[in-house]
Amino acid sequence: MTDITNYIVKGSKPADPIAAKKIRTQAARYSVVAGELYRRGFSTPLSKCIDQQHADYVIREIHEGICGSHSGGRTLVAKVLRAGYYWPTLKIDCAEYVKKCKQCQQNGNLIHASAEQLHAVSAPWPFAIWGIDILGPFPLAKGQCKFLAVAVDYFTKWIEAEPLATITATNIQKFVWKNIVTRFGIPYAIISDNGLQFTDKKFNNFLESLGIRHRFTSVEHPQSNGQAEAANKVILTELKKRLGTAKGAWAEELPEVLWAYRSPPNQAQKRLRSDWHTARMR
């Protein structure tokens, strides 16, 4: 990186013609602003070029810092670039860091083929169809909470989650009203399993009064609510990576897990959410 900086600022280049040509080609993708070297991107702002010492700090902070999610190598690379940093060995360093991360190796998912044929559930528009499920019991946390209500939108994959002390129909009704209806509007349908809190007459009367269709998964095929199951897996995996042995702190760590998940490096997903929120503001 020093050779590129010297070429741009001072015009100096190696005596070897081949090396000089290489530096000249590489320098076309870089700029010097206020004495700092930046790399140009095709559709992104300038990325600041940093040395290895700063690179190690950036990787560690993004991977396991306050907003880190112990993401995989490719996702970690995307997050570093989105944060505005670059160095030549970025991809290799991120992959190696994930391989050496103890929490990632202990709690990472094992990749395997699906045990059965997948069944897709399509959603017509954002926040129209939600899958809802309950996780727990967990170790007792602050506020006597030991369960987790989880809802995921089938279109945008947005996750809402809230710790609960008990999983009564009344608490589930409050969760749906607070985390779905008042934030994203009345959905077209909600998909759940056949738990007592979901089949409760009071809860179903609440949904019916709002015009929300309630769809139940088959007892013999609970995987039909696969989106909620996938959300559960994401939350459980990230909580395990963050908590270590402090299992009772899961409720305090939940906001950070959701924050990390809701800040995706996937540009298509990011653009989809941005466009939808812009349309809602008009």
Image: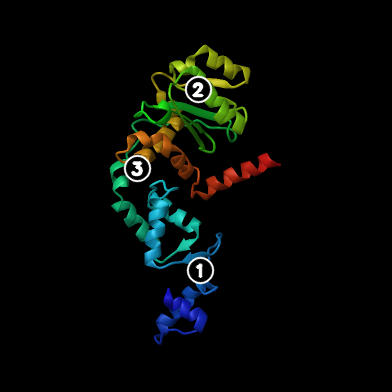
Q: Which residue is mark 2?
A: 172
In the rendered image, residue 137, in percent from the top left (x then y), is placed at: 36, 26
Q: Secondary structure at mark 2?
A: helix
In the rendered image, residue 220, in percent from the top left (x then y), is placed at: 38, 19
Mark 1: few, some, or many residues within 10 Å (few <14, many ≥20)?
many
Q: Is residue 41 visible?
A: yes
Q: Residue at x 55, y 47 (%)?
A: 270
Mark 2: few, some, or many residues within 10 Å (few <14, many ≥20)?
many
Disc sitting over residue 241 in the figure: 3
Q: For residue 123, which quarter of the picture? A: top right
Mark 2 or mark 1, which is nearer the start of the sequence?
1
Amino acid at pointer 3: Lys
Q: For residue 244, which quarter of the picture? A: top left
Give the Cα separation between the discs numbered 1 and 2. Answer: 50 Å
Amino acid at pointer 1: Tyr
Q: Nearer the viewer, residue 173 or 114?
A: 173
Q: Nearer the viewer, residue 164 or 51?
A: 164
Mark 1 or mark 3, which is nearer the start of the sequence?
1
Q: Residue at x 56, y 61 (%)?
A: 45
The answer to whether marks 3 and 1 mark residues whose Cβ atoms lie closer than 8 Å is no
In the rendered image, residue 9, in percent from the top left (x then y), is placed at: 51, 80
Amino acid at pointer 2: Ile
Q: Which residue is mark 1?
A: 38
Q: For residue 110, which quarter of the picture? A: top left
Q: Secondary structure at mark 3?
A: helix
